[in-house]
Structures are given as C-alpha cells and as structure tokens.
C-alpha cells in the first residue's frame, strides 16, 4: 500500500483505480481496522478473510520462514473486461513490484 499512495494522482491520470486486498482476518494479528485508522489509504481496502481470492490467483503462501497462511505480496492489473494484464508475485514478504514497472503497465492498457 505504502508504495502506491504517493502515486495516486498519476494512477488516476492514466484512468486506473486501485483496490487493496489483504489475506487477513478482521480480528486477528494485524488488526486492519486499527491500522487503517492510523494509516488511512486513498483506495478501497478489502479483506480476503477465507483466502478464496488469494488462492484463486495462485498467491496463497501456506508456509515459509516469513509467512504462515497468508498471501505472497502481489500486484495485479485487471482490465475492465476482467482480464489480468499484469501480475507480479513477490518471492517473500518484502518483495514488491517495482512502481515504475506497474505505472508503465498501466499506461500501456489505456
């Protein structure tokens, strides 16, 4: 989330919008409501509490040294038609899509 917030105007200029999705239970460790109250975001934020979306996109991360039943960090660009046009799946919990790569992908599907 933090990587995209500074680019919200540019994302809007290319006609895109974002939705953040977290593979997290509402009342578990991360406490998303509390976090978002302290760190507001500009785009909708959804919880994938049963991991259905995470699993459907092949992003479920069952077990690793830095993960236990969560999602790989990922960035997907989904066209209005519903077609996935870009996907970046992080190898670990700190691996994120390069922002310029994402912005370039957004510009290409305009």
Image (cartoon, grey):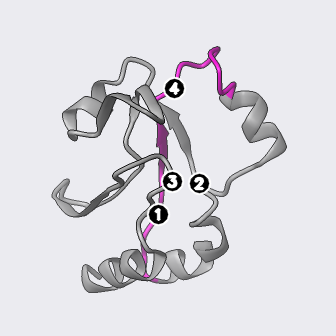
Q: Which residues are magenta?
A: 14-31
- The disc placed on residue 43 is 2
Labels 1 and 2 touching (C-beta < 8 A): yes
Secondary structure at badge 1 equals loop
The residue lying toward the viewer, choosing from 4 and 67, is: 67
Majority secondary structure of the magenta segment?
Answer: loop
Query: Where is mark 4, residue-wise?
Result: 24
Residue 21 among magenta residues: yes
10 Å crowding of disc 1: few (<14), some (14-19), many (20+)? few
Quarter residue 30 falls in: top right
Task: Give the total number of marks visible in the rendering.
Answer: 4
Structural distance between the alpha carbons of marks 2 and 3: 21 Å
Residue 64: % across, % down: 38, 32
Quick one: quadrant of the C terminus?
bottom left
Q: Nearer the viewer, mark 1 or mark 3?
A: 3
Q: Residue at x 51, y 26 (%)?
A: 24
10 Å crowding of disc 3: few (<14), some (14-19), many (20+)? few
Who comes first in sequence, dot 1 or dot 4? 1
The residue lying toward the viewer, choosing from 18 and 15, is: 18
Tell me if 34 is positioned left or right of 81 in this view. Answer: right
Who comes first in sequence, dot 1 or dot 2? 1
Q: Nearer the viewer, mark 4 or mark 2?
A: 4
Structural distance between the alpha carbons of marks 1 and 3: 23 Å
């Amino acid at each position: 989330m933090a990587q995209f917030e500074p680019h919200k105007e540019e994302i809007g200029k290319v006609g895109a919008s974002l939705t953040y999705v977290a593979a997290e239970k509402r009342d578990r460790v991360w406490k998303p409501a509390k976090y978002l109250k302290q760190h507001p975001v500009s785009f909708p934020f959804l919880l994938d509490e049963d991991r259905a979306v995470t699993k459907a996109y092949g992003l479920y991360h069952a077990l690793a040294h830095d993960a236990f039943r969560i999602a790989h960090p990922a960035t997907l660009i989904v066209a209005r038609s519903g077609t996935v046009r870009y996907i970046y799946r992080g190898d670990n919990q700190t691996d994120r899509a390069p922002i310029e790569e994402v912005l370039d992908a957004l510009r290409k599907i305009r």
